[in-house]
Amino acid sequence: MSVAQQAAVRPGRARYLRILLPICLTFFVTAIDRSNIAVAVPTIATDFQLSTAVVGVVLSAFYWGYVPVQLPGALFGQYVNAKWLITAALALWGLGTVLSGISTNLHELIAFRVVVGLSEGAAVPTLLVLIRRWFPLEERGRATSAFFVFGQAGNLVGTAITGVLIAATSWKIMFFIEAVPAFVVAAIVALWIADEPETDPRLGEAERRMLLESRAREAAETGTHQTARWTTVVRSPVLWGFVVVWIMSSAGSYGLQSWVPTVVEEVTRIGIGNVGLLSAIPYVIAIVLLFSVGWASDRLHRRDVFIVAGFVLAGLAIFFGPGISDAVGKLVVIFLGAGCNAAITGIIIAWLEDLTPHSHVGIAIGLVQFFGQMAGIGAPLAVGFLAGTGPATDALWVIGAGLLLGAVVTVFIYLGARHRARHAATVPVAAGRAA
């Protein structure tokens, strides 16, 4: 197909609105219902008389449910049905959020947070599988970054309005109100989403053909064998490199997401409403950077350079920032570090999808998510444990060190991807494009 013919059938906005928008809205709601506990926990800790260590347990409870279902959810979405899995998950985590609002003690709250984690954990990897199906290599960085932009927007909105809602009502009523969007988006997904371009009756034939042909071009450019067995994918050193990278990135994201409101309260001693508003600043930074990095990685046909830079900047900021004596300077550096780490989440997943055969991307995403999301359990607990009875800022260095390790592993992934592209059975392309 000529360049002119490809341009004539290039997907229009309908696919972005009907497929990508519901996917992004789902992740938006996920972020609200995941992040609200971080703002609510100081008030909950007062009501339930919790220590700092027990607060760490509450913050990690979501991930006890979220982590185990990553691989089963991805496999179900890949091989059975993605649309109805996402719809059911949205309804279940809406219910779990409602139940969180009626909890009367610590054990009930933890149990209901696990329910929210179970439902969201099944849906998120399936959403990423759908992005891989519907958006080719030259669009995937932007599509995946848009996905994470909506996640950061959900964190921003959830963090900002949660504090306001609690101040105006109570933390219990806040959970009731913030459960509503999950049920609304479930209806949108049920009406709009389609599982595959091959079987979507609303997709034009020219657009369908272009999407399917793009898979063959992508395989040639990245060195992925579309007929590879799933065991080949699981044994790949590149995949396990991504596991380590995603663990480090997730530790940064979830550790900071969980503790930044507490850090803000420790440093500023302001009211709960203002804590939520101030804690939303890192998400504003992340949204701006996600758009920029996603576009640039597609435009320059590189992911690795941006990922390494993001890890290094974030790691240095989180490692050294808490030691700054000036309160404003300390928060500015920590906020910038959190924003830089969040900025590369989209292209990490896009790069994983670039380097994984279409037929088995669910396995790769499920494994990476499974191991990576364990950081959601470990990071809040690690910071709480290392801080002990002291301020949380004393323990943020462990997150910074992990981010710097992520930069090192990214370099090894790049070298492995370049080697595989050069030795693929198909005609190799420039190493920069393969990476």
Image (tube, rainbow, N blue to C red):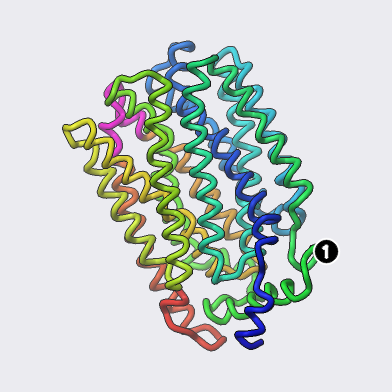
Q: Which residue is mark 1?
A: 201
Decide if residue 129 is on the left or right side of residue 279: right
Decide if residue 15 is on the left or right side of residue 427: right
Decide if residue 399 is on the left or right side of residue 357: left
Q: How many marks?
A: 1
Rendered residue at 42%/79% (across/down): 431
Q: Measured from the top left, where is residue 199 in percent x and y?
A: 80, 65
Check the picture and name the quadrant holding the C terminus.
bottom left
| Element under disc 1 | loop
Furthest toward the right, the residue is: 201
Decide if residue 297 is on the left or right side of residue 175: left
Furthest toward the left, the residue is: 325
Does residue 78 belong to the magenta stretch?
Answer: no
> Main structural element of the magenta stretch: helix, strand or loop?
helix
Q: Measured from the top left, where is residue 297 in percent x and y?
A: 44, 66
Q: Nearer the viewer, residue 351 or 397?
A: 351
Q: What's under tag 1, amino acid-wise?
A: Pro
Which span is picked out in magenta? 383-397
Q: Is residue 390 above or below residue 71?
A: above
Q: Is residue 153 above or below residue 269?
A: below
Rendered residue at 53%/39% (across/down): 154
Query: Can residue 69 be seen in this snapshot?
Result: no
Q: Residues within 10 Å of mark 1 (few under 14, many from 20)?
A: few
Does residue 384 belong to the magenta stretch?
Answer: yes
Check the picture and name the quadrant holding the N terminus.
bottom right
Query: Can residue 127 be seen in this snapshot?
Result: yes
Q: Measured from the top left, where is residue 258 in percent x and y?
A: 43, 33
Q: Measured from the top left, where is residue 375 in percent x and y?
A: 45, 43
Q: Nearer the viewer, residue 139 or 312?
A: 139
